[in-house]
Amino acid sequence: MMEASELFREGHDLIYGVFKEKCDEFWESMRKVQHYAEGVEKGKYYEGQVKKNLLSAKSRRSAILAANRFDYVLRMMKEAFELEEIVVRDQGRALQVYKDYPVEYNYGWVDDVTLEELNELFKNPAIKEPPVDIYATVDTTKKVEPQLLKEEVIFKVQIAAHTVPITEEYLRMVYKGTHKIDMIYEDDWYKYSIGRYATLEEASASLEECKVRKAFIVAYKAGKKVSVSEAVGSNEGM
């Protein structure tokens, strides 16, 4: 039983080590370009949980060595195993957040930390503070750029999105093209996109040309975001 438990620990350590190394590489890459990766609070939160649970797991394994009661040893092994599984899970979650930066997703993870909980933990006012140059929202009567209201349908290529602003310097690392990068504050997200195209074909060509992983096409009709299929249908009906 002790041997099997130790093998599980070694397996967890191996996977955790790979994930941790990749996370450290992310922070090293940020350091090299002198960029503070704002908006990765979720990743930092999970790395904090990893440190706490790793210490708890180690303390239980240390307790096993000094114990002589079978039921106690069995309970400590079980708790250590469960904590080590959570360590691997949370380090993997942190890595996923860093890999997707500067885009943030709703991953739908079980027992995931909420945005409200992160706001409370990190007390980051930037998360709730809209920028000055807001120009599109769901409500077309508020803070919408006049040009968007004049155009019936436009297509854009979204290259990044986050719950906090992303610096121009980092955006240019993600997108190396020459188009102006627009910022739209929409549904509590900062969304970054390029181009204003009259047709889906033009936007599709720009999407292929931009070479940004996970970029995609979005559409607006009279300043309000609509589905791409609805925008195409509106164009065909004109």
Image (cartoon, grey):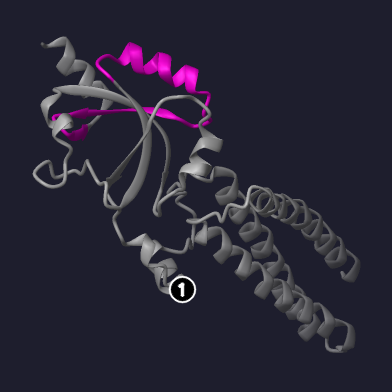
Say which quarter of the image contains residue 27.
bottom right
Horizontal placement of 33 versus 38: left or right? right
Residue where numbered disc 1 is placed: 121
> Where is residue 15 drawn, in percent x and y?
76, 53
Q: Give neighbour class at mark 1: few <14, some 14-19, many 20+ (Cα, 10 Å).
A: few
Q: Is residue 99 above or below residue 40?
A: above
Look at the numbered disc 1 and give the secondary structure of its residue: helix
Residue at the image position 81 percent from the left and 64 percent from the top: 9
- 175 sits to left or right of 216: right
Residue that appears at 49% across and 58% down: 110
Answer above or below: position of 78 versus 216: below
Q: Residue at x 49, y 32 (%)?
A: 214
Q: Quick one: 34 or 197, which is closer to the camera? A: 34
* 166 with respect to 11 (left or right): left
Magenta stretch holds residue 213:
yes
Give the residue displayed 61% in from the left and 60% down from the top.
90
Which image quadrant is residue 74 in?
bottom right
Q: What's under tag 1, amino acid-wise? A: Leu
Give the magenta part as a residue range. Answer: 197-225
Q: Is residue 38 above or below residue 124?
A: above
In the image, residue 57 lies in the stretch drawn in magenta: no
Observer-nearest residue: 232 or 158? 158
Residue 62 lies, in percent from the top left, at 84, 82
Q: Position of residue 14 (x, y in %)?
A: 81, 55
Q: Quadrant of the C terminus?
A: top left
> How many discs mark residues in the rendered view?
1
> 132 left or right of 83?
left
**Where does the N terminus fall, quadrant-wise?**
bottom right
